[in-house]
Image (cartoon, helix red, strand yellow):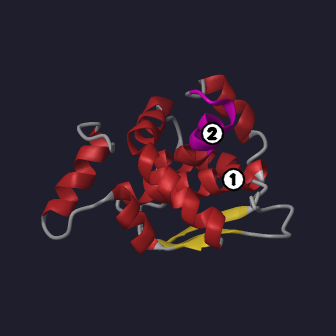
């Protein structure tokens, strides 16, 4: 007997979006309180909750959600036009982008490309369980323990490391 499962692509896209916020934020040194999917809220289908940081949420982490969501839905690296059009829908992200000031979108696209395996691993957790935490992000990124962790994350930020 074969069991079939229906995949909700819209919910999967939300999981991709939120996972990318979490991965990019963590790479930039932000604490992740939790990442979750939200059922029944027409305004917010998901959320990535960062711990307080005086620098706020870095632009890479803001843009990464939309960039990853579009990469998933379009099947290719999104253009600046794709991202701009999608931000018209994501009001919260659009507001954070506006407050971040001028920004080079290629930074976020590069970070999403380099960390795509970690994003997709986190998506599986989010889609399956509805929630993930900082430990899940840490494991998905395969961050080494101890003193090497900072250098590892710096290499991801700078483009000197890509996850396989």
Q: Secondary structure at mark 2?
A: helix
The residue carrying mark 1 is 12
Question: What is the quadrant of the N terminus in the image?
Answer: bottom right
Q: Which mark is residue 57?
A: none
The reply to whether the magenta stretch includes residue 71 is yes
Please count the marks in the image: 2
The stretch of residues the image draws in magenta is 66-76
Q: Position of residue 118 (x, y in %)?
A: 43, 53
The reply to whether the magenta stretch includes residue 135 is no
Q: Residues within 10 Å of mark 2 (few under 14, many from 20)?
A: some
Q: Secondary structure at mark 1?
A: helix
Residue name at image x 55 percent, y 28 percent = 77
The residue carrying mark 2 is 72
Could you tell me if residue 62 is visible in this image?
yes
Q: Position of residue 156 (x, y in %)?
A: 30, 45
On screen, residue 138 above or below 80: below
> Would you say 46 lies left or right of 51 here?
right
Q: Position of residue 97 (x, y in %)?
A: 60, 45
> Would you say 46 lies left or right of 61 here?
right
Quarter occupied by residue 71 = top right
Q: Position of residue 26 (x, y in %)?
A: 40, 60
Mark toward the start of the polypeptide (1 vs 2): 1
> Would you say 28 lies left or right of 94 here?
left
Residue name at image x 69 percent, y 49 percent = 13
Mark 1 to mark 2: distance in Å?
9 Å
> In this view of the protein, which residue sits in the foreground, 106 or 3?
3
On screen, residue 122 above or below 159: below
């Amino acid at each position: 007997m074969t069991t079939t499962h229906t995949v909700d692509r819209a919910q999967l896209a939300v999981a991709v979006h939120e996972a990318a916020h979490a991965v990019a934020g963590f790479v930039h040194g932000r604490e992740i309180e939790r990442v979750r999917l939200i059922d029944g809220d027409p305004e917010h289908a998901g959320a990535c909750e960062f711990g307080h940081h005086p620098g706020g949420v870095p632009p890479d982490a803001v843009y990464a959600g939309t960039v990853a969501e579009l990469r998933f839905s379009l099947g290719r690296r999104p253009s600046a036009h794709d991202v701009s059009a999608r931000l018209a829908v994501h009001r919260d992200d659009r507001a954070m982008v506006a407050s971040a000031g001028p920004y080079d979108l290629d930074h976020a696209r590069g970070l999403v490309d380099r960390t795509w395996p970690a994003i997709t691993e986190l998506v599986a957790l989010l889609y399956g369980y509805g929630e993930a935490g900082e430990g899940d992000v840490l494991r998905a990124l395969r961050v080494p323990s101890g003193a090497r962790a900072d250098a590892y994350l710096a290499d991801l930020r700078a483009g000197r490391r890509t996850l396989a």
